[in-house]
Amino acid sequence: MKEKIFNAKCTCRNCPAADFGGKSEKDQGGSEARVMVECRRRPELGFFDPTNVTFEKCSEWISTPYGYFLKDMRVMILGIDGYLGWTLALWLGKLGCKVSGVDNYNRRNWVKERGAHTVVPISRMTERLHAAKEVLGIHINFREIDILNKSSLKEFIDEIKPEAIVHYAECPSAPYSMIDFEHASLVQTNNVIGTLGVLFSMHEVVPETSLIKLGTMGEYGTPLSGRPLFEGFFPEDAVLHWKNRKWSMGGELTPRYPASFYHITKVQDTINVHQSCRYWQLRSYDVMQGVIYGVHTEQVAADPRLRTRLDIDEWFGTVVNRYVAQAIIGFPLTIFGGGGQTRGFISLEDAMQCITRLIAKPPAPGEYGVINQMSGYYNVKQLAETVAKIGSEEFDFDVKIQRVENPRIEANRHTFEPIFDKLPDEFGFIQSNTLENEIRRMFKLLSQPHIKSRIEEKRHLIMPRTWWSGVKKEVKRIEMLNNSIRETVAKQ
Ligand code: USQ
């Protein structure tokens, strides 16, 4: 029997090519109203009921490994020069999308501000674009724009008329946002006001385009009640009991408990995006992404000029990426505090797959969907042990692990029960890559002499100096956890 493709039964209601002519499916009283549409790609169809045509039946939607996909779909990536943005641009270009993107090189500048650099060397944008064309045959339409410049952003969106917008153009660093008032305010302005400009621009010129907005699992934090981390909203059967009364909580946004001024920006974005969908019938998926790790996709590995960045400094390096780099230069892996902090994780490659599937099944008019995007969860001690084991056993590095003071305010031990069913159940996501496998790939790439020496060069930037309390001093070692993982492994 033919396997059902996850988006086969979606209809023109979900399709960004369906022109609603500014009409809303909600009438003035708020109830449903039937709207007839025209197709921007197939004007010969005239006016029709959008629920009559499915993706599987439409000649504009073609079969791909990621479900049906709109032919030559125009996708705009905000933050196209970053770790995720550049990787996605090549990935979608290879899939046949017409990729455009904006960036203002903030990430390059913030990392430079720390005195750090991406340990995997990356090219300048002009060279990147040239190499994408030469090696992969992909043309990317790039424009240097700061998304805070709303008129330039709107003008570019209006010119391209993207059918999906992926919004990565935010500062992603919790420590950076905790340095001082100036940095907290920069991160909050950049992220919150930048996103507001995206929402207003979309409302004004492309209201039927889907917005894939990057949020974070860190919006939920680690709730004091220990309740599961639902996908944005309480499920239908959740009930609140109070003073012998009870209420159904189904459909209400769950409370958020963000862990830094950066994470707070994502919570503010959540409310702004959610309400814009309600006020203006915009369509959005808010992606609560776990911590990303890794270096690999087929496209970024195709040529050194196509590589994406990899940061390992205290501000922009995330935990798994830092651990592998530390192992390679013999720096004891840095567990902050107790090591019981548990987070959701997903590899770079699987994150690309997820976003592609979300683009392939656009939300309906007014729909605001929240997706928890991760493929597994681990505590930081487990991660250190996994990196140490692979580094010692398979790559012959002498890997040590240390516990250091935790500069952050976060629970050392806590329950962590994330719900992440939507991606596999509704979007056909299948994890393609294990944590261990990606760690192996990272060891292979990062131990190349030119990259290893770039890590060595910035060794002094590994230990954090940015405390949530505002104090500026390097964290101290609490203890070494073992003399040598290699010795432990040898004794087993
Ligand atoms: N940690 C260590 N040792 C290190 C680095 C980090 O023990 O050397 C611990 C931290 O204390 C924290 C955990 O590892 O408990 C994760 O820290 P991280 O720096 O890898 O990631 P985080 O600050 O949480 O932020 C990252 C991205 C952010 C994204 C978030 C997803 O930078 O953009 O929103 O991951 S989540 O963590 O689910 O909120």
Image (tube, rainbow, N blue to C red):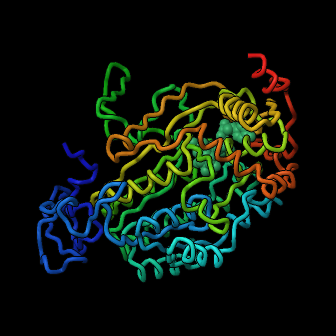
* Residue drawn where x is 54% and y is 77% of the image: 133
Residue placed most toward the observer, 205 or 112: 112
* Residue drawn where x is 38% and y is 54% of the image: 357
**Percent position of residue 456, x then y:** 86, 51
Image vertical order of residue 451 relative to residue 219, above or below: below
Image vertical order of residue 192 relative to residue 483, above or below: below
Image vertical order of residue 480 relative to residue 168, above or below: above
**Percent position of residue 107, x then y:** 68, 64
Residue placed most toward the observer, 396 or 21: 396
Q: Can you tell which quarter of the image residue 436 is in?
A: top right
**Percent position of residue 202, x then y:** 40, 71
Q: Can you tell which quarter of the image residue 230 is in?
A: top left
Quarter of image, ligand 1: top right
For the image shown, how many numbered marks are present on the structure?
Answer: 0
Residue placed most toward the observer, 348 or 31: 348
Whether residue 263 is visible here, answered yes or no, is no
Whether residue 405 is visible here, answered yes or no, is yes
Q: Horizontal placement of 449 versus 232: left or right?
A: right
* Residue drawn where x is 78% and y is 56% of the image: 451
Q: Can you tell which quarter of the image residue 488 is in?
A: top right
